[in-house]
Image (spheres, coloured by chain):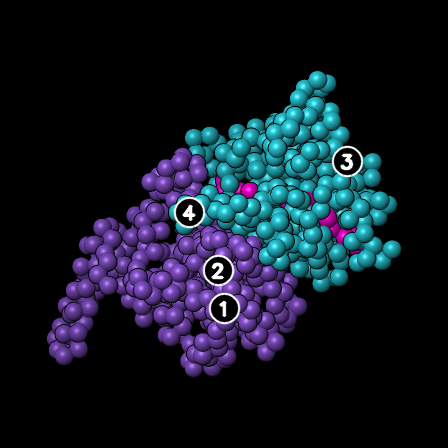
Chain colours: A purple, B cyan
Amino acid sequence: MNHVLAFERPVVELVKRVAELRELAREDARLSAELKRLEEKAAKAAREVFARLTPMQKVQLSRHPNRPYTLDYVHRLFDDFIELRGDRRFADDASIVGGLGRYHGRSVVVVGHQKGRSTKENMVRNFGMPNPEGYRKAIRLYELADRFGLPVVTFIDTPGAFPGIEAEERGQSEAIGSSLEVMSRLGVPIVTTIIGEGGSGGALALGVANRVLILEFSYYSVISPEGCAAILWKDGTRAPEAAERLRITAPELLDLGCVDAIVEEPPGGAHQDHDEAARRLDRALYEALMSLGGLDAEALREDRYSRFRRLGSFVA
Amino acid sequence: MVLPNKTPAQTPASEKRSLGRGVFQKCDGCGQVHTAEDFAESWWVCASCGAHHPMSPAEWRRLLLDDGALETWDEHVSPTDPLGFDDGKSYRARLERAVGRSGHSEAVEVGRATLSGRRVAYGSYVFPFMGGSMGSVVGERVTRLFERAHDERLPVILIHASGGARMQEGLLSLMQMAKTVGALRRFRAARRVFVSVLVHPTTGGVAASTALLGDVNLAEPGALIGFAGPRVIESTLRTTLPEGFQRSEFLLAHGMVDLIVPRAEMKSTLHALLSHLEGP
C-alpha cells in the first residue's frame, strides 16, 4: 500500500502528516488550529503540483494501485448491496462485478470493472480486463434493471477488453457490440463514471449512458498511450507524447463533449482519501440521476441516443 | 485499432485491373499465376484454390448492385482534424493522401440501390482509405444510413472491412461505435432487416460495433475477423496463434457467423435472405 509516484511524493508527505495530526487533534482540541493550517498547506501544495501534471502523469494516477476501485465505491455509496454473478451461459467473469444496491433509498443495478489490489486478486480479476462472459453478465444485469424499472449505475476502470485466444473464440466483438446495443435500448436511466482507466471498446461497453461523469485524474481513450506509441513510432516508451496527442484527460474530453462533468478528486488524488473521493462522486452521481428523474422510458432512450448522436467532428 | 498506413499496402483491385492486358498476378493463397484480366473476371477469386483477394468498393458495387449503380448519400460529409493530430506527419496530410490513393472521399460509401430488383440501403467500407478506419465521418455516414433506411423502409446491407477506430480522432472515434449501434437499435426496433457482410479484414472497434450484430452475418471465405488483432494477442500472450485463428471458418465453428459465402454466390444469397425476411 506504500506505492508512491515520484511526482506525488511531496504531496503524499503532507497528506500523511495531516492524517497524523488529525488523529492527535481528536484527543487534543488545542491542535485544531495547527491542523487547519496544515490542511490548507497540503491542499495548496496538492493543487500546485497537480495543476502541472502531464497527461501521462494523470494516466499513472488513474492506474495507481491504491486508487479506489468499483467495489470501494460500491461499499461506500450503496446500502444492502447484493452481488449477482454469472452470465448464465459460460462463466462468471470476476473482472466485471455487478449487483443490486440501494442508493439514497432507491434500488439500482450497479455494474463496474473490477481490478485486483494484490497480484493474487489480480489473477482472479484478470487485471480488470473482461472476457466476453463479463460483458454478457453486464447485459444480463442491464436487462434485469429494465424489467424491474431500476436505474443503472456503471463504473468504468479497465485497461481494455482482454485480448486472448478464448476471448476471440467466445466472441469478444459480439459481446461488446451487443452490450452497446442493449444499453442503447434500456428504458431506465443510466449514469456512467470513469473512475480510473477508460480503455477503448472494453470500457465503452459499460458506457452508453445518459450521463457520463469522469473523475479528475481518470483517462478515457480509443487506444492506450503505449499502444498508440507502439503503432505510430514503434516505440512504447514514447507513450507520454501519445498521451498528449490523443487528448485523453478529463478537461480535454469535456471540451470534446465526450464526457458531461468532471468530479474533482480529494487533494493528492482519489487514492489519498477513498471516503472523500466517494463523497464527491456521490454528489455528482446523485445530481445526474436526479436530472433524469422526470423522463419516461422512451424519453430516456431518445436522450441517450441524441447524447451520442451529436458526437463527432465533420463538415457537412 | 490501426494506423492504416502501417498495414500492408493493398492496391485496390480496380487499379490492378487497369494494369491491362498481359500483366500477371500471383494468387496469395496457392501462388498460381493468373493474367490480370482472368483474375478480375473471376472477381479476384483464384480459380485454382478459391482464395478471395481484396476487391475495391467499385467492384463490390458491380458484384452486388444492379448495373453496379449506387445513388450515394452524404458524400459531402467530410473529415476535420478535431485534435490537430500530428505524429510527424499531420492527420490532414494523411487524409489528403488517402483520398488520392483510394479515389474515395472517406472510408465508407453509402447510398440507395437495387439488388436483383429489390430496393436496398447499401454501405461498403473502403479499406484502402486509412484501413477502412472509423472516425467521425464514417460514424456519421453509417448512422445516417440506418436513419434513412428506417425512414424509407429499406433493408440495410453493409460490407464491413476495417481495422477499427481511427486513432487520429481520439475518443471521438470510439464514440462512433455507440452512435452507429444506437442508430442500428432504432432501425431494428422498426423490424427492418440488417445483413452484415464481413470481408477481410474486420477488426477492432468496427468488429465490436455493427459488424457482428446483423440479423444475419455473412462472411467471405478466409477473412480475418476479430476484436484484437493477431499481433496484439501474440505479444500479450507471448505465443504463436494456431493456423486459421480468427478466420471466417473459425468464426463459423464458434457460432459467430451464419454462413460463409463465396463471392460468386454473394448476390444470390443476399437476395434469397431478403426474400425470406421481407417477403417476396
Residue A61 visible in image = yes
Dot 2 or dot 1: first in sequence order is 1
Q: Position of residue B51 (x, y in %)?
A: 65, 37
Q: Nearer the viewer, mark 4 or mark 1?
A: 4
Tag 2: amino acid: Asn
Sequence order check, earlier mark of 4 and 3 = 3
Q: Quadrant of the C terminus of chain A?
A: top right
Q: Chain of mark 2?
A: A
Q: CA distance from mark 3 to mark 2?
A: 40 Å
Q: Which residue is mark 4?
A: B239
Which residue is at 68% across, 55% downward?
B258
Contact, mark 4 vs mark 3 (Cβ under 8 Å): no
**In whole angstroms, how far apart are the C-alphas of marks 4 and 2?**
18 Å
Question: Dot 1 corresponds to which residue?
Answer: A91
Q: Chain of mark 1?
A: A
Q: Which residue is mark 2?
A: A131
Q: Residues within 10 Å of mark 4 (few under 14, many from 20)?
A: few
> What's the residue at 49%, 68% (across, down)?
A91
Q: Which residue is mark 3?
A: B62
Contact, mark 4 vs mark 2 (Cβ under 8 Å):
no
* Amino acid bearing label 3: Arg
What is the magenta range? Answer: B152-168
Question: Do the residues bearing badges 2 and 1 touch, measured as CB atoms within 8 Å?
Answer: yes
- Say if residue A290 shows up in the picture: no
